[in-house]
Amino acid sequence: MAILLALLAAALIAADQLVKYWAIYELKPVGTMDFIHIGDFKIFDLTYLENQGAIFGVMSGKRWFLVGFTSIVVLAGIVLLIKLFERSKFLDIAITLFIAGGIGNLIDRFRFAFVVDMFELKLFRFAIFNVADICVTVAFVMLLIYGIFIDPKIEKAKKAEKEAAESNE
């Protein structure tokens, strides 16, 4: 399982960097490309953005703080993954997504001093984002699902198992 998680993280980081490479060399010169629309109704565009902050540009210009914070979060994710490894495959995947997304954006912050974003949801006003951001967002939702629905069942099963073992003694 550890090898699969490492491969998943590597594939997601590679996908993020490849899409960003494409955005820099193909999308940046044109700025924005129509992507998904119905008639004149735009749903999704590809828009080049150099984000010097975090989500919605918050903390813009705080490069080294964001590098440090993201590094700490990624390292904490790695420690958590090691500590909780195989508690739940769902949890392992969520933490791996979180780590991969963090590393993907961290690479940009080191290389460019900003994060390359390109996906713009036009259906409603939303931040322009990238593959790494998708990984982090999906990981966050998965962690919420895990914390609300899955972990309580695991803890309940462990408690029942412990009580059964104690009653057999």
Image: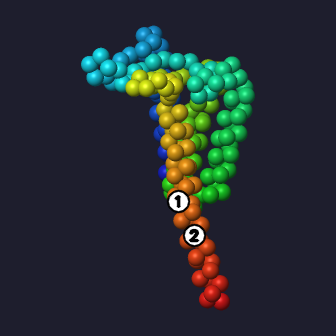
Which corner quadrant of the image does residue 86 belong to?
bottom right
- Residue, far bottom: 169
Q: Earlier in the sequence, mark 2 or mark 1?
A: 1
The reply to whether residue 13 is visible in this rendering is: no
**Disc 1 on helix, strand or loop?**
helix
Q: Residue at x 32, y 20 (%)?
A: 41
Expressed as whole percent of the image width and height from the top left, the position of residue 48 reads 48, 17
- Residue, far left: 39
In the visual, does 166 lie left or right of 153?
right
Q: CA distance from mark 2 to mark 1?
A: 10 Å
Q: Residue at x 72, y 26 (%)?
A: 64
Labelled disc at residue 150:
1
Residues 36 and 112: in front is 36
Residues 25 and 59: in front is 59
Labelled disc at residue 25:
none
Q: Residue at x 49, y 51 (%)?
A: 4
Query: Tag 1: residue type?
Result: Ile
Q: Residues within 10 Å of mark 1 (few under 14, many from 20)?
A: some
Circles 2 and 1, Cβ within 8 Å, touching? The answer is no
Residue 169 vertical position relative to residue 116 in the rendered view, above or below? below
Q: Residues within 10 Å of mark 2 (few under 14, many from 20)?
A: few
The reply to whether residue 112 is visible in this rendering is: yes
Quadrant housing the C terminus: bottom right
Label 2, on which residue? Answer: 156
Query: Tag 2: residue type?
Result: Lys
Residues 124 and 100: in front is 124
In the visual, does 130 lie left or right of 162?
left
